Amino acid sequence: MRSRTANRSGVVIRRRVTPAGDILLSLLTPQGKLKAVARGGVRGPLASRLNLFHHVHVQVYQGPHNDLASVQQAVLEGALPTLAQPERYAFAHLMAEFADALFQEGEFSEQAFELFAGALRGVAHQPDPEWVALVMSYKLLALAGFVPQTAHCARCRAPEPAHPDPLGGQLLCRDCAALPAYPPDALEFLRGVARRTVRASMEAPLPPAQRPALWRALERFVTVQIGNVQSWRQLVPHVQAAPMP
């Protein structure tokens, strides 16, 4: 494999500092996810630029025998300071970990990058960051090809299910369900969020009391279909603690 240098512009969605002071990064870019390392970066000028959620332009070098590209230069293109607020950081971190799980290296998707960047801006600036994160999580899922089954019962295929599926995060019919049906507005959200525009969903937020059940359904579906996302429990504790409707 030949050595090569490349320039990429993207958002830092994962950041970890090693004991040696290197910064391990994942960036979501229009060309797909990029994993790289800034060697000794925690002690150098790159440290403040390569922070979580920062939009950066990086020059990376891929050596012939290196698994990870090495960050040579980084220029900060944009930052969202309000994401440091506790009520926003939790949801921004969840969105970043979610994107890291959904999208793989080499999967070119400018639409995924734009949708994720828009989600972060919404979490940073909108008065209801939780609703932004909930809507955009479902939209990112749909873009990646993961759409919960809502037209038929996930177990018996009966039409028009309306009850939570506590194991798979989809919908069950009355005969297969052990839990009460979703409220009508929550059910309408689940059935239409994948095809509805972001603007339409944002203009019709559900009341906070109905959201924990939707977060729980999303967590179950993502865990079964994609894998575990730690932020569900660490950063959005009410998802686990709230009772079912």
Image: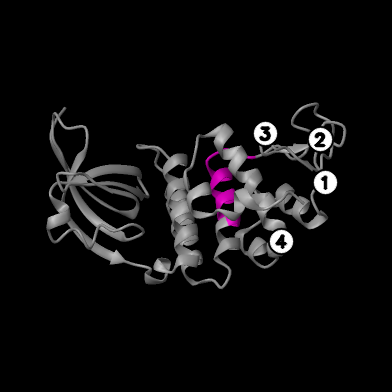
The boundaries of the magenta stretch are 134-147
Q: Amino acid at mark 3?
A: Leu
Q: Is residue 55 left or right of residue 240?
A: left
How crowded pointer 3 is (Cα within 10 Å; few <14, some 14-19, many 20+) is rated as few
Label 2 secondary element: loop
Label 4 CA crowd tier, 10 Å (few <14, some 14–19, many 20+): few
Q: Is residue 193 visible?
A: no
Question: Residue at position x 74%, y 40% from top?
Answer: 150
Residue identified by numbered label 3: 167
Provide residue 172's location: percent of width, then percent of height: 78, 36
| Alpha carbon separation for disc pair 2 and 4 | 21 Å
> Which kind of residue does numbered mark 4 sit on?
Ala
Q: Quadrant of residue 185?
A: bottom right
Which mark sits nearer the N-terminus, 2 or 3?
A: 3
- Label 4 to label 3: alpha-carbon separation: 21 Å
Q: Secondary structure at mark 1?
A: loop
Say which amino acid is labelled 2. Answer: Ala
Which kind of residue does numbered mark 1 sit on? Answer: Ala
Give the residue at mark 1. 181
Mark nearer the N terminus (4 vs 3): 3
Residue 209 - label:
4
Q: Label 4: state its secondary structure.
A: helix
| Residue 211 location (% of width, % of height) | 67, 56
Q: Which quadrant, please, contains the N terminus?
A: top left
**What residue do we see at 58% from left, 32% from top?**
224
- State the mark number for residue 177: 2
Could you tell me residue 182's position as x and y percent? 79, 49
